Image (cartoon, helix red, strand yellow):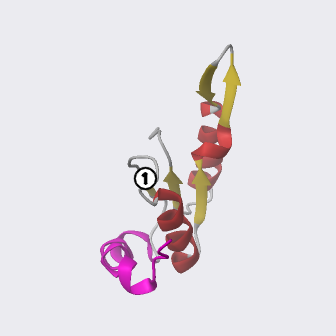
Amino acid sequence: MTFKTERDYSPAVEALKPLITNLPFKIVSIDGLPGAGKTTLGRYLAYKFNVSLIETDLFIKRRNGTLNFHNSQIKRIIEIRKQRDLPVIVEGAIVL
């Protein structure tokens, strides 16, 4: 297994610096195929920029054999960040 290093993420960090650093509310979304590294990248960026990360996989519920997202809970968290004028990273299979 290969672990990403700061050097691997430096293009993403540099691209996001002007969007996240000392600016008001923003949503940064990360999407991709399963196993692409969305969670790892999201956790690193949240750490690097000291912002909240919403891992949408944690908001999945199974009902009648299908998977459904708790969209209302994700939206509520985003709204709280917006009211406080703080950025948030949303990682996962959905972009609200």
Q: Is residue 73 visible?
A: no
The image quarter containing residue 15 is bottom left
Q: Is residue 1 left or right of residue 83?
A: left
Q: Amino acid at mark 1?
A: Ser
Of helix, strand and loop, which one carries label 1? strand
Q: Look at the image and say whether residue 20 sits in the magenta stretch.
A: yes
At horizontal 61% and vertical 26% (from top left) the residue drawn is: 68
| Residue drawn where x is 69% and y is 18% of the image | 63
Q: Nearer the viewer, residue 22 or 29?
A: 29
Any magenta on residue 57? no
User: Who's the residue at 59% across and 60% down the image?
Assistant: 53
Residue sitting at the far front? 1
Residue at the extreme bottom of the image, as rendered:
7
Nearest the eye: 23 or 38: 38
Q: Report whether 48 appears left or right of 61.
A: left
In the visual, does 92 lie left or right of 71?
left
Q: Is residue 26 above or below residue 21?
A: above
Q: Could you say where residue 54 lies in the image, as x and y percent from the top left?
A: 60, 53
Image spot of residue 74 (x, y percent): 62, 41
Q: Residues within 10 Å of mark 1 (few under 14, many from 20)?
A: some
* Residue 32 drawn above or below residue 87: above
Q: Residue at x 52, y 79 (%)?
A: 48
In x, y percent, where is residue 62?
68, 25
Find disc 1 in the rendering and name its residue: 29
Main secondary structure found in the magenta portion: helix
Q: Which residues are magenta?
A: 1-21
Residue found at the very far top of the displayed protein: 64
Question: Residue 27: percent from the left, percent from the top?
Answer: 45, 54
